[in-house]
């Protein structure tokens, strides 16, 4: 029996990861979901949040921030169709908080803005939330390692 | 020597123009390469979305009735056209050709009494549509040199929502397809309603999925993303065409400037020679008079 599964992590502009993984944890519609090899066929909506992938040859999980999208599992193959993915190596907390506040403000006085501007603001809010969550996770992890 | 001086300054100015067009040509070449890379980079997403939509749509005829996105309208009374053009000019006949196709499409639709609504991407198309006085249901200008999904999602969601609410019966996209560096072709493709052919449906059984939160919501979300990704590819194609077309236009401008310089140089040398001959003749006739 195989103990790895194939993971394909793409967003609309590029492919960020493709290869074998031991398991994957994503922020699905009904809460966090963990997927191991040979999972049953599944399609779920993703909420803004953290996606973690455990690679066979690495000790630590790889962490990505995802603004939303879909996750599909089909015959030992996981496809993540994200709206926006950000790598989490260089996150700037202050800037993200500012981006989030800014987007929230814009959404609150949404009557004046056109609907298609809203889509953009919403996307910016989602990715900011996702990155902040990723940052939280990374902080917690480094505390665990250090403490 | 006043004529000579005039020609000299003219040569100088053509040379300067040539320098500019040559620089623009080189910039366009490098931008074209970059855009082509981005086109390639976005392909895995497009492929995967298409596969998922195809899997879902294949699950049975019941999916047809599940969402308004998969309906197949029998009578068409109102269509949306997504028009993709460039923001800037100086790219040969690219926009002219695209707009010509757009105009012809509108004419044929109007002839069969179908109303048209436009969604415009790019400055040139925006101006044109305003001039025609068409109703616009979404627009984005200033797309820049690299295709960005977040700039397209807004205007496209306008069209998608209208199709979803049955205000539009079909959606087309008109853009300039990048065939190779020398050749770009304006094309008109159908975005919605989706047909089996678009999705490359294969026969064969598929396992049903578990859905979170529910099949309808998942299907609608995935179809939205599918249409967005198709449109994104079209925009990327159009941008590559723009740069390729600009590269060719600037190359021929540079070549033309070169031949203009040659002609001017010839004229300059002739006038110089003429004045020397004249002076010589004057000297000779002067000395013979003495």
Image (cartoon, coloured by chain):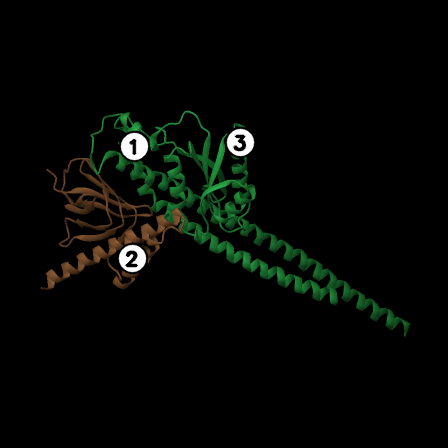
Chain colours: A brown, B green
Which quarter of the rendered picture does the N terminus of chain B lie within? bottom right
Mark 3 vs 1, N-terminal side = 1
Image location (x, y in percent) of residue B35: 41, 49
| Residue A100 numbered tag | 2
Question: Which residue in the structure is indicated by mark 3?
Answer: B110
Q: Secondary structure at mark 1?
A: helix
Identify the residue at the far right of this view.
Answer: B289
**In 3D space, how far apart are the residues under numbered discs 3 and 2 (Cα atoms)?**
46 Å
State which quadrant residue B191 falls in.
top left
**In 3D space, how far apart are the residues under numbered discs 3 and 1 (Cα atoms)?**
33 Å
Q: Secondary structure at mark 2?
A: helix
Q: Nearer the viewer, residue A90 or B15?
A: A90
The reply, left or right, for residue B161 in relation to residue A39 is: right
The reply, left or right, for residue B7 in relation to residue B147 is: right
| Residue B66 numbered tag | none
Q: Residues within 10 Å of mark 3 (few under 14, many from 20)?
A: few
Which quarter of the rendered picture does the C terminus of chain B lie within? bottom right
Image location (x, y in percent) of residue B73: 39, 27
**In 3D space, how far apart are the residues under numbered discs 1 and 2 (Cα atoms)?**
36 Å
Indicate the chain on which mark 2 is placed.
Answer: A
Q: Nearer the viewer, residue B86 or B70?
A: B70
The answer to whether any part of residue B32 appears in the image is yes
Q: Are marks 3 and 2 on the same chain?
A: no
Q: Secondary structure at mark 3?
A: helix
Proximity of marks 1 and 2: CB atoms separated by less than 8 Å: no
Question: Which residue in the structure is indicated by mark 1?
Answer: B54
Image location (x, y in percent) of residue B245: 51, 47
Q: Residues within 10 Å of mark 1 (few under 14, many from 20)?
A: some
């Amino acid at each position: 029996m195989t103990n790895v599964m194939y993971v394909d992590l793409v967003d609309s502009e590029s492919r960020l990861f493709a290869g074998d993984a031991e398991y994957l944890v994503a922020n699905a519609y009904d809460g966090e979901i963990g997927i191991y090899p040979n999972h049953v066929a599944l399609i779920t909506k993703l909420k803004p949040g953290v996606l973690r992938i455990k690679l066979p040859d690495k000790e630590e999980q790889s962490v990505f921030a995802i603004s939303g999208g879909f996750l599909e599992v089909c015959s030992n193959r996981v496809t993540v169709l994200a709206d926006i993915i950000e790598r989490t190596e260089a996150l700037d907390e202050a800037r993200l908080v500012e981006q989030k506040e800014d987007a929230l403000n814009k959404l609150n006085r949404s009557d004046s803005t056109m609907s298609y501007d809203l889509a953009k603001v919403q996307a910016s809010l989602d990715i900011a939330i996702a990155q902040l969550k990723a940052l939280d996770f990374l902080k917690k992890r480094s505390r665990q390692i250090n403490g | 020597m006043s004529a000579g001086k005039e020609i000299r300054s003219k040569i100088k100015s053509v040379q300067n123009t040539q320098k500019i067009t040559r620089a623009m040509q080189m910039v366009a070449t490098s931008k074209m390469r970059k855009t082509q890379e981005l086109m390639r980079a976005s392909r895995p997403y497009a492929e995967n979305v298409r596969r998922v939509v195809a899997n879902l749509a294949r699950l049975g005829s019941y999916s047809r009735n599940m969402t308004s996105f998969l309906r197949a309208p029998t009578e068409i009374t109102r269509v949306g056209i997504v028009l993709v053009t460039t923001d800037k000019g100086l790219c040969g006949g690219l926009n002219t050709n695209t707009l010509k196709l757009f105009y012809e499409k509108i004419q044929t639709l109007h002839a069969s009494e179908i109303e048209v609504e436009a969604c415009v991407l790019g400055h040139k198309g925006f101006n044109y549509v305003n001039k025609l006085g068409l109703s616009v249901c979404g627009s984005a200008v200033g797309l820049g040199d690299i295709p960005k999904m977040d700039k397209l999602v807004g205007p496209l969601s306008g069209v998608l929502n209208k199709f979803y609410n049955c205000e539009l019966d079909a959606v087309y996209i008109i853009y300039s397809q990048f065939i190779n560096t020398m050749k770009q072709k304006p094309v008109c493709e159908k975005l919605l309603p989706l047909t089996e052919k678009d999705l490359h449906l294969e026969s064969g059984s598929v396992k049903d999925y578990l859905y979170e939160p529910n099949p309808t919501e998942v299907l609608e979300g995935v179809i939205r993303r599918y249409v967005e990704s198709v449109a994104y590819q079209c925009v990327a194609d159009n941008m590559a065409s723009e740069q390729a077309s600009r590269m060719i236009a600037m190359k021929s401008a540079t070549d033309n400037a070169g031949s203009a310089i040659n002609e001017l140089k010839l004229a300059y040398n002739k006038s110089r020679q003429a004045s020397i001959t004249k002076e010589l003749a004057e000297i000779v006739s002067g000395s013979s008079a003495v």
